[in-house]
Image: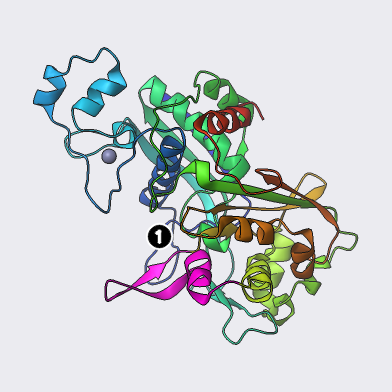
Amino acid sequence: MELTVTFKTLTPFWTGGVGGVSDRLYETGLLGSLRWWYEAIVRGLGGSACDPTEHACNFDEEKYRRSQATDRRQRLRDAGLCDACQVFGATGWRRRFRLEVVEDRTRVAWSPSSEMLNIRPPDRRRGWFLPPGRMGTFTLRFIGEEEALNMVAALLLFLEQWGTLGAKPQLGYGVFQLVDRPRIVERARLWMWEGMGDREPRPVLPDLREFGFFRLRFSPSRPNWWLNVPGLERVPAEPIRRLVVEHRAIPVTPALKNQWRFHLWKGRPSEEVYVFGSAEWRENGQQIRLRSKVAVTWAYPVGDEWEVRGFAWLPKSVPAQRVWRILTDPNGWKQAIPVSGILSAFPKGDWQVRSAVEIAKLLNETKGA
Ligand SMILES: [Zn+2]
């Protein structure tokens, strides 16, 4: 079967590139993020998703034949496949769907295409560097088993609401709108998210039960409201003109992160780095890139309003309540984006790790949205 989906980008997409230039959309970059989200969902539903950097699943045909399980998922587990690899593939087991870019009408968001946009709030020396991702519309074709395509449709509807596609979500990349979404909704109705087991969250693997989501909606009173966002007044005129006039996407991510990390955070420096990320984290004597646990998008218009949204993965190893208070403090948002708006968050109020049942409910709600 086939499922054809057209996407409109709301913030730049980064799916890979050559020499720092995003020259086209790469299927591998899109698939990588679909898998990452599916793994977080599977774990959030209490199912099993291996850590592909640690050990990979391996399909054992002999064990599959010998399994007594009547349930297909359990039988594949018996054969050595975690719930994520059952759909996304592993050694000896093919991914349940293929993905092709059939039409790519995106282009680099500003020129020159090799130039990073440096956004430096007034109190920062270095600031943030944003690579020129791609914006526009594109069409993907998914080919595979019906059940897998139903799941993909449901996954895309969730990502449209709360997630991202491609790389660099921490910099606000990969937000999209589905064109012709009634067709996707119809397909997603055939898929039901439900509990997959009773596994507890593990400390190093993203698990939707430990995710928080937040969203700001606002109606600016002036068209050039973004001039008061710290750091944007220093951005060169040409890229910012393209972003404001052509793409209607305003990079507010650095101002928000600056506010949260350098103004509101009062915890230990080691915790700060673990929560907000570092390019120079040392682990077991090796220097690695530690990704921020907090992702927040750019601002983009939705109907008559503007929106900024994001998510945070707050595992037990971080002071989750403290971080959550900062991320959901309306005053912090107002310092970075001087507009009046309405901030909503899930979970509401205090931080709490949610149950698989609550995650299934959240996921199923986005199917009909
Ligand atoms: Zn696996």
When the figure is inspected, residue 364 is found, relative to residue 133, above or below; the finding is above
Scheme of image coloration: rainbow
The x and y percentages for residue 16 are: 40, 60
Q: Quadrant of the N terminus?
A: top left
Residue neighbourhood size for the residue with mark 1, other residues' Cα within 10 Å, grouped as few (<14), some (14–19), many (≥20): many
Q: Please tell me which residue lies in front, 15 or 167.
A: 167
Give the quadrant of residue 57.
top left
Residue 87 located left or right of residue 107: left
The x and y percentages for residue 282 are: 35, 75
Q: Is residue 196 visible?
A: yes
Q: Which residue is mark 1?
A: 16
Looking at the rendering, the stretch of residues picked out in magenta corresponds to 267-291
Whether residue 274 appears in magenta in the rendering, the answer is yes
Residue type (three-letter) at the residue carrying disc 1: Gly
The x and y percentages for residue 221 are: 90, 60
Q: Please give the name of the residue rendered at 63% of the width and 73% of the height, measured from the top-left corner.
A: 266
The x and y percentages for residue 115 are: 52, 76
Residue 197 located left or right of residue 310: left
- As helix, strand or loop, the secondary structure at mark 1 comes to loop
Give the quadrant of residue 173.
bottom right
